[in-house]
């Protein structure tokens, strides 16, 4: 097989289920889980264990009666800032060795903005917000998004890989292929290595990061909903590949009359069913957040058939009553929640 074809082939193998890995072996300690349902507002929830720190960032806003929109931007910026993290400029590159970032944001009035295939900008979520607030458009991509960011005053960061990303990429280049790996994050005994700081994510047993996205949805003291999602996308993806995260309706959707939803996992399969929008519509039909997330996961499961076990997808949701819930295809997904009285990880039920 030619190198080019091998590369394409490898990429497809990766996209089958290589959920988003990054080398960095280290000791791990346990997060605290609880799966009680929480109701009321203000409330913020976000995907994976990086969400705990991100929620603190969001609470700086929500705790002072700030808006959900400001909160979901501030919250995921915490994760984007973390150098040794799976989200943002420290994350795994695409197969050509470049980190390319996607992000989206949506408020309680159907205003939304997104950026995709954005390089060398530290806070894609804030650029997405500027797209929403300062342009007549919803989405900017690639060099256009970068030019817009620079014109808006965002510094152009050097094009370098983090130490962890360099190691992962060098490892990946040896074979340019992967076997699917299902995330098993948050099984007891798996959390962030201390040297990577409090917002670093859990690892797979081999030390790889198992996700590269944070999605966050929040309801503020006024009862308004907003959401944000930011990612480096799938590690070693084809150059130019976008997942669900920057696509409104797929990786993120907010309808202030009904609820707010964000997704994580294999973006291609979330896009296929307009995942987050579907979950909002299931909630409109009267389903609880968990039931609605489950409906979307079941649909992906039906579509994928036997291949469902090779991927992970998960949704988290808040409805208009401030009830929260989530559902995942595979075991091992959790989300972080923060309210006035609660701050914890919630282990999520799964289909498989
Ligand atoms: C994507 N949905 O780019 C993202 C990946 C993800 O945790 O959620 N990783 O497909």
Image: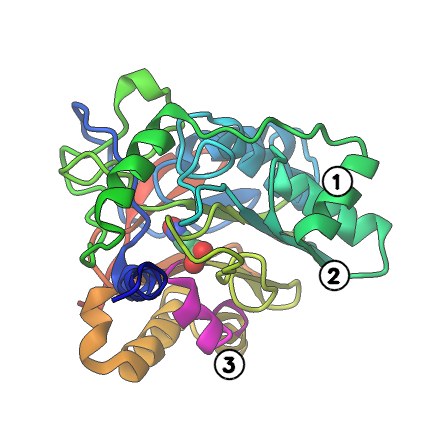
At numbered mark 3, what does the secondary structure look like: helix, strand or loop?
loop
Q: Which corner quadrant of the image does residue 72 belong to?
A: top right
As drawn, 199 above or below 332: above
**Label 2 to label 1: alpha-carbon separation:** 14 Å
Mark 3 or mark 1, whichever is nearer to me: 1
Task: State ligand 1's quadrant.
Answer: bottom left
Dot placed on the residue nearer the N-terminal end, 2 or 3: 2
Q: Which residue is mark 3?
A: 285
Dot placed on the residue nearer the N-terminal end, 3 or 1: 1
User: Residue at 39% of width from left, 71% of height from top?
Assistant: 269
Q: Position of residue 29 (x, y in %)?
A: 18, 26
**Label 2 to label 3: alpha-carbon separation:** 27 Å
**So how many labels did they put on this image?**
3
Q: Please provide the residue range marked out in magenta.
A: 265-277
Q: Position of residue 50 (x, y in %)?
A: 39, 35
Dot placed on the residue nearer the N-terminal end, 2 or 1: 2
Q: Which mark is residue 138?
A: 2
Q: Mark 1: give few (<14), some (14-19) or many (20+) Cα within 10 Å.
A: many
The foreground one among 20 and 192 is 20
Q: Which residue is mark 1?
A: 149
Mark 2 or mark 3, whichever is nearer to me: 2
The foreground one among 227 and 204 is 204
As drawn, 27 above or below 276: above
Q: Position of residue 177 (x, y in %)?
A: 24, 55
């Amino acid at each position: 097989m030619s190198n080019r074809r091998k590369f394409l082939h490898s990429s497809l193998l990766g996209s089958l289920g290589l959920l988003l890995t990054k080398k960095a072996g280290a000791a791990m300690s346990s997060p605290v889980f609880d799966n009680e349902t929480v109701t009321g507002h203000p409330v913020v929830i976000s995907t994976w264990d990086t969400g705990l720190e991100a929620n603190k960032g969001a609470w700086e806003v929500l705790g002072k009666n700030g808006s959900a929109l400001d909160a979901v931007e501030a919250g995921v910026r915490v994760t984007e800032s973390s150098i040794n993290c799976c989200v943002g400029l420290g994350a795994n590159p695409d197969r050509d060795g470049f980190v390319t970032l996607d992000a989206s944001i949506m408020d309680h009035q159907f205003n939304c903005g997104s950026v995709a295939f954005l390089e060398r900008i530290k806070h894609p979520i804030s650029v997405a917000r500027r797209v929403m607030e300062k342009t007549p458009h919803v989405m900017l991509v690639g060099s256009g998004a970068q030019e817009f960011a620079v014109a808006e005053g965002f510094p152009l960061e050097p094009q370098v890989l983090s130490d962890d990303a360099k190691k992962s990429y060098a490892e990946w280049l040896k074979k340019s292929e992967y076997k699917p790996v299902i995330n098993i994050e948050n099984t007891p005994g798996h959390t962030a290595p201390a040297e990577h700081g409090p917002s670093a994510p859990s690892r797979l047993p081999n030390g790889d990061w198992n996700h590269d996205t944070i999605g966050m949805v929040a309801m503020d003291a006024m009862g308004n909903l907003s959401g944000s999602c930011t990612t480096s996308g799938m590690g070693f993806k084809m150059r130019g590949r976008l997942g669900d995260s920057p696509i409104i309706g797929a990786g993120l959707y907010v309808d202030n009359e009904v609820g707010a939803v964000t997704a994580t996992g294999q973006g291609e399969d979330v896009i296929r069913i307009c995942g987050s929008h579907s979950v909002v519509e299931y909630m409109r039909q009267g389903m609880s957040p968990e039931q609605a997330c489950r409906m979307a996961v079941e649909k992906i499961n039906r579509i994928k058939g036997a291949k469902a076990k090779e991927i992970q997808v998960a949704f988290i949701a808040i409805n208009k009553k401030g009830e929260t819930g989530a559902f995942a295809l595979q075991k091992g997904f959790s989300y972080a929640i923060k309210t006035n009285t609660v701050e914890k990880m919630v282990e999520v039920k799964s289909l498989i």
